[in-house]
Image (cartoon, rainbow, N blue to C red):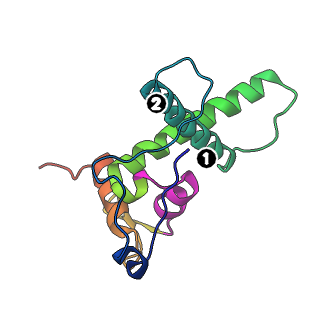
Amino acid sequence: MRHVRRLSAETAAGQGELFTAWRYRTLFTDSPFETLQTELQHRQHATIEQVIADGKGSAPAHPPSGDFQANAARLTLRAIAHNLLRAADALTGAFHAKATTATIRTHLVHIPARLARTARRLTLHPPTRRPWQHAFTRLFHAVHPPPTR
């Protein structure tokens, strides 16, 4: 269990630390592992729980059907969509790397844009004053680099 108490500047001004060199915390477990192994296992478990929560909040989060093949296909598509969104957020920057799947979809996928065709080429015209325009541009250029001539 980790408890960090945040104090305001006025309260913390007269209060010094008990031990300045070490930060102690309590850990209660019935695990046979060492402390570092237990902490690593806990962090991995928390990561898995976040992935499950993101999956439940994503688009194909419908109740399962009675057909095993349909459930397997839905789970496969959910895993592919989750991995693609996580790869996209890794290419955009630090903010989106910590964001949930719903935030990534809102900022990078659901973008109103105009598609124009000129000289047998398709041109995408995204909005110019969007707060996440630079993240989308970084992602777009990482996936589709400009042509080299």
Q: Which mark is residue 13?
A: none
- Judge by depth and name the residue closer to the eye, 62 or 147: 62
- Give percent across and percent down for residue 49: 61, 39
Most prominent secondary structure in the magenta stretch?
helix
Q: Which mark is residue 40?
A: 2
Q: Nearer the viewer, mark 2 or mark 1?
A: 2
- Give percent across and percent down for residue 36: 42, 28
* Count of picture labels: 2
Find numbered disc 2 in the image and state the secondary structure of the residue it sits on: helix
Given the current orientation, which residue lies at the most extreme right position?
66
The residue at the point 56 percent across, 17 percent down is: 32
Given the current orientation, which residue lies at the most extreme top position?
32
Precedes in sequence: disc 2 or disc 1: 2
Give me the C-alpha separation between circle 2 and circle 1.
21 Å
Magenta residue check for 128? no
The residue at the point 59 percent across, 34 percent down is: 28
Left or right placement of residue 75 versus residue 4 in this view: right
Left or right placement of residue 104 versus residue 52 in this view: left
- Judge by depth and name the residue closer to the eye, 145 or 92: 92
- Residues at marks 2 and 1 touching, judged by CB atoms closer than 8 Å: no
The three-letter amino acid code for the residue at tag 1 is Asp
Given the current orientation, which residue lies at the most extreme bottom position?
10
Q: Which residues are magenta?
A: 97-112
- Judge by depth and name the residue closer to the eye, 28 or 63: 28
Identify whether 127 is placed above or below 83.
below
Identify whether 15 is placed above or below 51.
below
Find numbered disc 1 in the image and state the secondary structure of the residue it sits on: helix
- Would you call the spot at circle 1 few (<14 residues within 10 Å), some (14-19), or many (20 or more)? some
Left or right placement of residue 77 versus residue 97 in this view: right
- Give percent across and percent down for residue 19: 33, 52
Instruction: Find disc 1 in the rendering and name its residue.
Output: 54
